[in-house]
Image (tube, grey):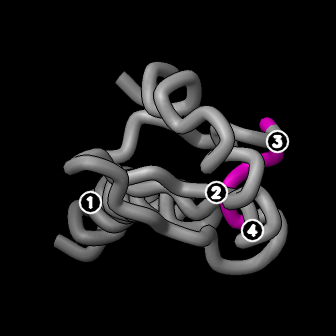
Amino acid sequence: MKSKLLLAIIFVLPLALASCSKKDDAASNGGSEDYPLEDCVVSGEPLGSMGEPYVLEHEGTTVKFCCKNCLPKFNKDPDTYVAKIK
């Protein structure tokens, strides 16, 4: 009985931990499961590489930047950057 329990723990625990790590990866890079990009639309830097991503709603589209410093460049030509998300 103990050996069956031990085998179950050995095989089930890694699967449970692996499924959690996928969610943690999305959160650690600033992305989310419903946001399609892992990098800033302006700089190309990974989201979360400079702290919490700066998030903006632009005409109904969520846009995430690596930092707030990317906002002025985005505002010069937002349609170009929003197209990258869609």
Residue visible at 73% across and 40% down in the picture: 42
Q: For the residues marked 2 and 3, what is the alpha-carbon distance in whole angstroms?
A: 8 Å
Q: Identify the image quadrant of the N terminus.
A: bottom left
Foreground: 72 or 70? 72
Pointer 3 with pointer 1, Cβ within 8 A: no
Circle on res. 8? 1
Residue visible at 24% across and 70% down in the picture: 5
Q: Which-is-in-front pick, marks 2 and 1?
A: 2
Q: For the residues marked 2 and 1, what is the alpha-carbon distance in whole angstroms?
A: 43 Å
Amino acid type for the residue under numbered disc 4: Cys
Pointer 2 with pointer 1, Cβ within 8 A: no
Circle on res. 20? none
Left or right for 27, reference 6: right
Q: Is residue 52 magenta?
A: no
Q: For the residues marked 3 and 1, what is the alpha-carbon distance in whole angstroms?
A: 46 Å
Disc 2 or 3, which lies upstream in sequence? Answer: 3
The residue where tag 4 is placed is 67
Residue visible at 70% across and 65% down in the picture: 48
Which residue range is magenta in the image?
Answer: 44-48
Disc 2 or 1, which lies upstream in sequence? Answer: 1
Q: Identify the image quadrant of the C terminus.
A: top left
Disc 3 or 1, which lies upstream in sequence? Answer: 1
Badge 2 marks a residue whose secondary structure is: strand
The residue where tag 3 is placed is 43
Badge 3 marks a residue whose secondary structure is: loop
Amino acid type for the residue under numbered disc 2: Phe
Can residue 7 be seen in this snapshot?
no
The residue where tag 2 is placed is 65
